[in-house]
Image (tube, coloured by chain):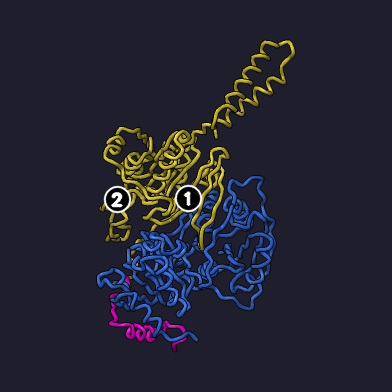
Chain colours: A blue, B yellow
Amino acid sequence: PSTLLYLEHAGGKITGGSLSALTAAKALGGDVTGILVGSNEQVDDVLPKATKVEGLTKILASRSPSYSHAVPEALVPLFAKLVQEKGFTHLFSSTSSTSKSLLPRLAAQLDVQPISDVTSISLESDGDVYTRPIYAGNAISTVKPTFEGIRIITVRGTAFPQATTGSSEAPVEEVNPIELSEVPTEHLKTMATESSRPELGSSDIVVSGGRALKSAKIFDETLTPLADKLGAAIGASRAAVDAGYADNSLQVGQTGKIVAPSLYIAVGISGAIQHLAGMKDSKVIVAINKDPDAPIFQVADAGLVADLFAAVPELVNKLPDRK
Amino acid sequence: MLPSAREKLVLQGAVSGELGLPAAALPLFSFVAVALFISLYLLTMRPTPRSLLRILVPVKRCVDYAVKIRVNAQQTGVETNVKHSMNPFDEIAVEEAVRLRERMKDSIKGITAVTIGPSKAQETLRTALAMGADDAVHVEVPESANVEPLAVAKLLRAVIEKKGPYELVILGKQAIDDDAGQTGQMLAGLMGWGQATFASKLEVDEAKGSVDVTREVDGGLEQIRVKLPAIITADLRLNEPRYASLPNIMKAKKKPLEKFKPEDLGVDITPRLQVLKVTEPPKRVGGQKVENVDELIAKLKEAGVLPGAA
């Protein structure tokens, strides 16, 4: 196999999702070539870090102002050309909002059926086999592509460890961008949620709040000290997001972020199926809820039936300080 | 947009015709001049150009979101002898199309709902019609057929070519059965149209012939402007779909519904992926309780998941 890996970047760094996708791509064996796109400044900024990522055979870099916001309509011609000219057998990426928009568009133009949100990969004697969750993770489908042509795969980040950064120095090849005379889509602005906390999708500890938090103010006042004490990311249930207690970028669940930290603390979350689909692969799940029948307790390794407004401050108080 | 663009073309035709006229053909020339004047008058005097958008809304019949999913004994799929309903994201798409018409009464010429599915998928189309779609297209496939997103996108392209023009396609960002989340982007790729995925807000600007879309992306929101024709995939927060009223459900039964088979549309729906098996996810052993905060902390220390608490 010869794999092209889409190296996504945010804030001058390769995303954790792309590093997980690299681990997944390595499972196939063969070469993995990274493709890094962006404005001139973005590429300058990220490239030195990208070359240090262990496991990349080579990095293709393409710079253009029209690549700065990863608009699929602008990027697809470049990806299509690289795939066709360089004979890649596989194209991998993370299951990010960018890749989810880009890869299916590309796949349709190449007449290929992509495979989304892959959680495991195996190479059998008669070809490659993938598993992916369906029905919000309530069933697992095992599929094998039966067509000739490139496999286009998005990878669920939490299912694969992130590739590490080391002393390696992958060679870089600059690739000319493809400038279109007209792109039907124009990026106007990004309204990023600013946060000094670890990123929700890759944090080792997540503290999540539900509707029982009552208001945005109480949500913050209750969960922030706990998250600070643990160095955790903050998440929220859909109910809390819909009620306006938390920003929608914090939503954990089938329709939000899928997380799998070492420790997940669900505070005042009842545990709707769609929330469980987003966090049930966490290593240790703690639930704090005053309703002993809440479904969240069925998946909890440590369920505490208690009033969260008493239990959470007590927990903050008694938790050991981080070193 | 489109009709006015067409009128502009006619106008250009008239102008070039005028330039090519021999001086002797004066009566014809004045006729063309008058026609030109009238067209100009019509174009400029009309308060807003009636752009007459047509919207296509693809919908999918899925196992209802509230049904507990069970894998079948043969491990070939899930039990499907359960309640089905319209994919919730597609319901949001239908609602958005109907709201656009409510907001821009004269500009939306029609809303067509289309489904690809077995005969029972007709119920899903009737739901869309009861919510406010005008007509429906059913591409009927056998109950057992597994139609992958690539084939769905090709069928939708064929429907657009046959029944179009459509200037806007609005559909759910994913279906809650296979969770692939590909169809809209694939259709956009096949058509060469602009796309706006994960939309949580959209505003159509008729004059500019574009849509401004707020998208839900990792780490926040993004705003983009897409030229028409365009494909938009609906995210949860775009709107809250209405319930169809009884009179509207009755009315929906009389709205036109046209049927095709994939062969009629010249599309091969043979799957590209072989499903080897469908299995239950590993069961999580949970249900363990602790009595108080001290016990909770002790347990977390034991599990080794507390930072700095070695």
Q: Residues within 10 Å of mark 2 (few under 14, many from 20)?
A: some
Q: Nearer the viewer, residue A183 or A120?
A: A183
- Image: B132 above or below A28: above
Report the residue at 26% width, 53% height from top. Answer: B82
User: Quick check: is A92 in the magenta stretch?
Assistant: no
Report the residue at 43% width, 35% height from top. Answer: B110
Circle 1 chain:
B
Image quarter where the N terminus of chain B lies is top right
Per the image, label 1 sits on a secondary structure element best described as strand
- Which amino acid is tagged 1? Lys
Residue B84's mark?
2
Q: Are marks 1 and 2 in contact (CB under 8 Å)?
A: no
Query: Where does the magenta region start and end?
Result: B283-310
**How many numbered circles are shown?**
2
Q: Nearer the viewer, residue B4 or B84?
A: B4
**Is residue B283 shown to the viewer in this render?**
yes
Q: Residues within 10 Å of mark 1 (few under 14, many from 20)?
A: some
User: Quick check: is B285 in the magenta stretch?
Assistant: yes
User: Which residue is situated farthest in the bottom direction here?
Assistant: B310
Residue B201's mark?
1
**Is residue A152 shown to the viewer in this render?**
no
Q: Could you tell me residue A126's position as x and y percent?
A: 46, 62
